[in-house]
């Protein structure tokens, strides 16, 4: 699933976590909450000095 297909969480749901998220990361908070609620997370993580490592959490 791409981020374009993801329905973000409501502003009311995201406002609970806003004090704990800084700066530009707040823009992604509704999408992060939505992924958490779906129970599925896929992606890749950049490791310093190495290539991206894929991960899947469900």
Image (spheres, rainbow, N blue to C red):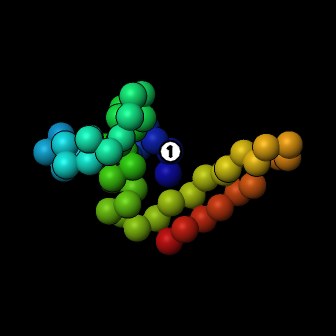
Relative to 58, say whether 22 is above or below: above
Please state which of residues 18 and 9 is positioned toward the viewer in this rendering: 18
Extreme residue toward the left, this view: 12
Relative to 51, say whether 27 is above or below: above
The quarter of the picture where residue 4 lies is: top left
* Mark 1, secondary structure of its residue: loop
Please state which of residues 16 and 45 is positioned toward the viewer in this rendering: 16
Left/right placement of residue 23 relative to residue 57 reads left
The quarter of the picture where residue 31 lies is: top left
Q: Residue at x 66, y 51 (%)?
A: 44
Q: Position of residue 33 (x, y in %)?
A: 33, 53
Left/right placement of residue 22 relative to residue 41 reads left
Relative to 24, say whether 53 is above or below: below
Q: Residue at x 33, y 53 (%)?
A: 34
Q: Residue at x 36, y 40 (%)?
A: 21
Relative to 9, say whether 37 is above or below: below
């Amino acid at each position: 699933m791409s981020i374009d297909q993801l329905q973000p969480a409501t502003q009311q749901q995201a406002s609970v976590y806003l004090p704990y998220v800084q700066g530009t990361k707040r823009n992604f908070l509704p999408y992060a909450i939505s992924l958490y609620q779906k129970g599925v997370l896929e992606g890749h993580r950049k490791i310093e000095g190495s290539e991206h490592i894929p991960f899947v959490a469900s």
